[in-house]
Image (cartoon, rainbow, N blue to C red):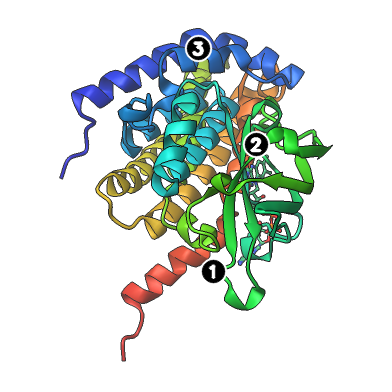
Amino acid sequence: MEFDPTDEQAALRDDAREFAASEIEPRARDLDDAGEYPAEVMAALADRGWTGLTIPETHGGRGRGFVDLALVIEELSAAMMPVASALALHLGVARVIQRHGAPEQRERFLPGMAAFETVGALGLSEENAGSDKLAMETTAERSGGEWVLNGHKRWVTNFLEADEVLTYAKTGPESAAPHNVTAFLVPTEAFEVETVWETLGARSVKSPKVTLTDARVPDDRAVGAVDEGYVERGEVVTGVNVPARGVGIARAALEAAVAYAGEREQFDRPIGEFQGVRWRFAEMAERVEAARLLALRAAARADDGRSVGRELSMAKISASEAAVDNAEDAIDVHGGIGYTTERPVERYLRDAKLLTIAGGPNDVHRNAVADGAIDRYGHRG
Ligand SMILES: Cc1cc2nc3c(=O)[nH]c(=O)nc-3n(C[C@H](O)[C@H](O)[C@H](O)COP(=O)(O)OP(=O)(O)OC[C@H]3O[C@@H](n4cnc5c(N)ncnc54)[C@H](O)[C@@H]3O)c2cc1C
């Protein structure tokens, strides 16, 4: 059993850590305050080839696996979670094209995506299709040799900077579900922006609601088999980034708390010497390590082509809750100043909260973990 990254993975992680410290951290607070897209950071990520991190080298990417992705995402998220979201959503769209796109679609879209000249966004969720994605109401119908899409998508992260939205639409009758959904690459110009929400956290990368009215796309924009988009999506691993983002925030909160408790003195000693504060560090460190092990186990299984549903659900719950709990503990350790924007810990809490919801609410992931537990330990008659 191997618990350490390879030399190559450790070098990639160290590069990402250095990049996060020099390119992201100095800008994070201002970008968050202004709710401004981290354009320069994303351009610098593209210069390093990380916007194509998991895209095959034959299509201009770096051809790295899920463990590598998890290591990089943890570092980016520790500095500024929305940067990691923007990258992860983009690479998730590329992965569906890699796995289910036609060879000519891979040629056409992936090199531009690797260079971040073509930015991807995901249009899956809708008003009535949150956890229950098959309740989606967007339709695509045949007309004049093309597809005509009508409906809406909400929470389309990256939309305002994106070029292509991987849009899921009903193409078959309800009686055929789940074999009644097709994925399309729809250019962002085909949508109208209906609502751009202000959010508690992740303020720099917006996730608006967008509508489609008689938007026409040709056949060569259907990705994968017609009517099989939902089923095919289930075969693609896109969820590794969410736990990795949680681990990043949880670790950043621990680092901030330990550093502050070493400087801040009350009762003639650093507050980090008080037993109560030290025990918080212990719990925070356990959460980081447990979440990271679960996240990397899921990523390593995905790299080996093994099933990851239950493992990813466990990692997602553990890491997102570690991020929220550690951010809250870090604020407590900071006292009043932790409640202000002078320190980053209040941002960690706001950003962390998204992770218990996005990528599927934790309660829904608990269903998957419970099913696994019952299968494994339940009464077998
Ligand atoms: C900032 C942000 C960015 C996002 N980015 C994207 C994106 O880029 N693309 C995209 O397609 N989607 C995106 N999402 C959507 C996200 O995946 C959904 O919010 C999520 O799947 C939950 O859907 P919902 O918000 O409608 O909550 P609901 O489905 O309405 O769930 C609300 C609550 O009901 C409970 N619940 C629901 N079903 C069950 C169940 N079966 N068992 C137990 N409890 C249950 C849970 O407590 C849950 O938290 C984003 C969301 C946010 C907030």
Q: Which residue sits furthest right? A: 194
Label 2 Cα crowd, 10 Å radius (few <14 / some 14-19 / many 20+): many
Q: Is 40 in front, or is 115?
A: 115
Q: Earlier in the sequence, mark 2 or mark 3?
A: 3
Residue 327: % across, % down: 57, 33
Q: Taking the image as drawn, is residue 75 in sight?
A: no
Residue 357: % across, % down: 62, 49
The quarter of the picture where residue 120 lies is top right
Q: In percent of the image, x 63 and y 30: which residue is there?
A: 163
Q: In percent of the image, x 62 and y 20: which residue is there?
A: 344
Apparent side of residue 27 relative to residue 259 in the rendered image (left or right):
right
Q: In percent of the image, x 66 and y 51: which residue is there?
A: 146
Q: In the rendered structure, find residue 179 and report the number of the disc placed on it.
A: 1
Label 3 Cα crowd, 10 Å radius (few <14 / some 14-19 / many 20+): some
Which structural element holds mark 1?
Answer: loop
Residue 21: % across, % down: 47, 12
Q: In the rendered structure, find residue 157 and report the number of the disc placed on it.
A: 2
The quarter of the picture where residue 130 lies is bottom right
Q: Is residue 10 above or below residue 368?
A: above
Q: Looking at the picture, which amino acid does disc 3 mark?
A: Ala
Apparent side of residue 326 relative to residue 131 in the rendered image (left or right):
left
Label 1 Cα crowd, 10 Å radius (few <14 / some 14-19 / many 20+): many
Q: Taking the image as drawn, is residue 331 in sight?
A: yes
Q: Is residue 183 above or below residue 21?
A: below
- Is disc 2's CB within 8 Å of ligand 1? yes
